[in-house]
Amino acid sequence: MKIFLFSLLLSSAVLAAPADLDRADQLLHKGLPAESRKIAEQELASDPKSLRARVVLAKSALAQQDLPSAHRCAEEVLKADPKNADYNALMGTVLVLEQQAPEAIGYLETALTQGAQEKKSPEAMALYSETLVTALQQAGQGPAALKRCLEFIQLYPQDANLYLAASRLYRERNDYQQALETAQKGLEVAPKFYNLYASLALAEAGLGHKDLSEKAFQQLLKYDPELAKVVRRVLDGTRKDSAELQLEVK
């Protein structure tokens, strides 16, 4: 499962963003983090106190896998506004990517608490939730990760990534039937969320349903050839199932 974490950081609690920073966000979404970063750095040069520019810089740095820069920006904005939901989510995201999941959990819990108080959108809250589940799983707290993930599905039933995470966590417990049913429910909610075919293929394989596993794999291959290459290796036994759930920034 690929979790595109920088999308978590789109909204900021500062006042209206300058037009050039809006353009920086647009460039980032077009896959041009270097250009986005340049705009953020220029804005900081003219206004060193701009939290908005630091958030854009952090997002750009994450997309470039420059974790030290992203970490510094996260610390700076969080110091300026420690109760801000987005800033706590940013810090939590960076820590997860730095393989410091236990330290990330508190920030992500704060993001959810503050997000509720700030009346964040369901989409934003679901993104916070996804990252918390990932942090719990990476911290070796599988049962807690699954419990929270199922709770979040009840709260945000349209979020396909939560079904993907829950299916993965069921597979971790060798509960392939629940993994399969969860992935199927996810596809009912989001039929174009093709990553769920990876979960279908792996769950069916775990149940010994070779033909059904191959059928799901062919669907994945049709829509996401790169992920299909990874899943093929898992199905062939040359890569661990956990490899399908690596965190990536795009």
Image: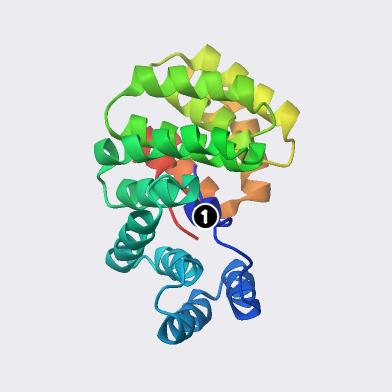
Indicate whether 232 appears above or below 44: above
Q: Give the number of marks.
A: 1
Q: Badge 1: how crowded within 10 Å, few (<14), some, or many (20+)?
A: many
Q: Nearer the viewer, residue 153 or 223?
A: 153
Q: Nearer the viewer, residue 215 or 92?
A: 92
Q: Nearer the viewer, residue 184 or 240?
A: 184
Residue at the spot 37% in from the left edge and 58% down from the top edge: 80
Q: Is residue 247 visible?
A: no
Q: Is residue 94 visible?
A: yes
Residue 169 on image: x %, y % = 43, 24
Color encoding of the figure: rainbow
Badge 1 marks a residue whose secondary structure is helix
For badge 1, the amino acid type reads: Leu
201 sits to left or right of 98: right
Residue at the spot 62% in from the left edge and 47% down from the top edge: 221
Indicate whether 42 appears above or below 171: below
- Displayed quadrant of residue 103: top left
Return the residue at label 1. Answer: 9
Residue 49 on image: x %, y % = 41, 73
Indicate whether 238 appears above or below 207: below
Indicate whether 169 appears above or below 219: above
Residue 128 on image: x %, y % = 50, 39
